[in-house]
Image (cartoon, coloured by chain):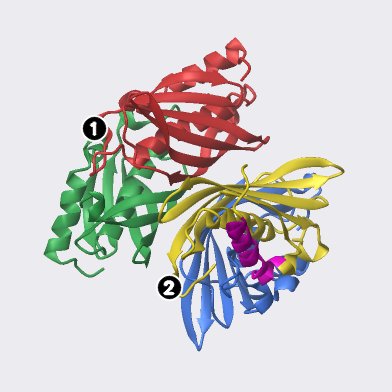
Chain colours: A red, B green, C blue, D yellow
Amino acid sequence: MSALDPKTDKRCRDSFSRQKAMATIGASVLSVAPGEVELVMPFSDKLTQQHGFIHAGIITMLVDTACGFAALSLMPEDAAVLTTEFKVNLLSPAKGERFIAHGKVVRPGKKLMVCLGEVFAEEGGKRKQVALMTASMMVMDTSTGLRD
Amino acid sequence: MSALDPKTDKRCRDSFSRQKAMATIGASVLSVAPGEVELVMPFSDKLTQQHGFIHAGIITMLVDTACGFAALSLMPEDAAVLTTEFKVNLLSPAKGERFIAHGKVVRPGKKLMVCLGEVFAEEGGKRKQVALMTASMMVMDTSTGLRD
Amino acid sequence: MSALDPKTDKRCRDSFSRQKAMATIGASVLSVAPGEVELVMPFSDKLTQQHGFIHAGIITMLVDTACGFAALSLMPEDAAVLTTEFKVNLLSPAKGERFIAHGKVVRPGKKLMVCLGEVFAEEGGKRKQVALMTASMMVMDTSTGLRD
Amino acid sequence: MSALDPKTDKRCRDSFSRQKAMATIGASVLSVAPGEVELVMPFSDKLTQQHGFIHAGIITMLVDTACGFAALSLMPEDAAVLTTEFKVNLLSPAKGERFIAHGKVVRPGKKLMVCLGEVFAEEGGKRKQVALMTASMMVMDTSTGLRD
């Protein structure tokens, strides 16, 4: 991963910090590179489903955001990003101390960017993959009123 | 929708109430019927993405839960439910006063149940569909230690 | 389903008849309406997987085409249709005398149309659903060189 | 990729050769390794959609089969494989001289195996990725009557 230019790096981090949902789940940015973003989230009891694992929707939210910012990092300045679809395969129950989501652009189109996302649970220094996402991110014209 | 027997109805609602993530997002049960569940969630600023819409991950969490409990309502007593995969198409930005998720079993298999989910945004008495989900729910043996 | 205007009806059927893959699998058009298309395909031994069922890829091809033409029926004249993604849940093994695919637009956007597709196997006058698809169809500018 | 033991190698290739749909599209096996399978298919005019590209359903069939045999290569002898769902993102139009599908198991569960599939178009010695698949393969008990 090469470094992102400082302006685009700032743009991605600023847009991330405007996501109130990210503060709610305690997520933060680990790394930003061209077409690749890593986020991290600690375990929290208030984000669990009925068996005590992190809810699949929370895992999805984390990796969707990683994929969205990976896409944004490759978009022109006058564009905003919007997810149009994703699919998630849940590989193992989401239990662990913290969760790392990695999003990467695999097809940087002009209108649509296709991303691959992975989520890993960390516990006692060990990593286990818990989710696999594929997603489509639309490159939105800022004439729509959306900005990033 | 016919009524669910009181025991299964209680089982689904109890399992729902053990999902701390549902309390965190303010979701509650609207209706439970055999193979069909409706949940509702009010708009909350703390669940938004960078453009002020409800985050796609939250919408996913709501409708995944509706689908999961729709599947659980058709499972034998000694089974627990676990999502193995879902895909969501985001049809419109999730803005509105409240959000209704409807989950329905379309294929009640012995090992896997396939569900169709829809989420609607309500504003000023009008409904607009914002998301479409297809999901697979695994019928887990309670010998795994999971209970519902 | 209201009727499609004759010009659009002809456009969809002409585009269908240019799909050589449809002739190869013996598929034909059952009905075309605004945003809804039905195709039919007889069972053929040469389209089977190792257990003697119709291969999931063939079922997918049939319903992807139904969804694509459903989307095309709602597009302006200077647009062509291209599938960007789909997901298929296989509900039952594809065995039967013939297979009916039904594609319907659920979200007719200007850039992307989201479709829901279903495939039914018919045997001895009975119908059983074998597949469920959700798909995104891109509205392509004909300046790309694509025509429909 | 380490080599597959001869018995399992033969089992996968035999099961492949029973797929009449693979003969119909001219596909053959390039390589088989534990949890990884590569198939190849030449371009054929009879497999095209209306713009002259290989139909997305054919591309799907090829990579679904690669994923299915990748899963089968890790299954016990008394098991058969059945696809329960897949999602495909179409990254570029499928044009080229031949198409290589690569299927890999990313999560080898006892009941479900999750696979990642990729399809590349080759033209003039160059490769371009045209599709990305995620799929769930069910490990079927042969008491169901299915054999592989």
Looking at the image, the residue that sits furthest to the right is D124
Q: Residue A93 location, x and y as percent?
A: 34, 41
Subunit of mark 2? D
Circle 1: residue type:
Lys
Does D15 lie within the magenta span? yes
**Circle 1 — which element?**
helix
What span is colored magenta in the figure? Answer: D6-22
Tag 2: amino acid? Thr
Callout 1: residue from which chain? A
Could you say where residue C130 lies in the image, as x and y percent from the top left?
A: 49, 70
Q: Is residue C47 visible?
A: yes
Would you call the spot at circle 1 few (<14 residues within 10 Å), some (14-19), or many (20 or more)? some
SS state under label 2: helix
* Residue annotated with mark 1: A46
What residue does disc 2 label?
A: D144
Q: If the image is split into quadrants, where does the N terminus of chain A sit?
A: top right
Please tell me the numbered disc located at residue A75.
none
Q: Residue at x 59, y 63 (%)?
A: D11
Report the magenta stretch's main SS. Answer: helix
Residue A108 in the figure: left or right of residue C90: right
| Residue C137 locus on image (x, y percent) | 62, 52
**Quarter of the figure with residue D148:** bottom right
Q: Is residue B63 left or right of residue B75?
A: right
Report the residue at 47% width, 70% height from top. C92
Queried whether the magenta region covers residue D33, the answer comes back as no
Q: Is residue A32 above or below residue C143?
A: above
Foreground residue, A146 or D58?
A: D58
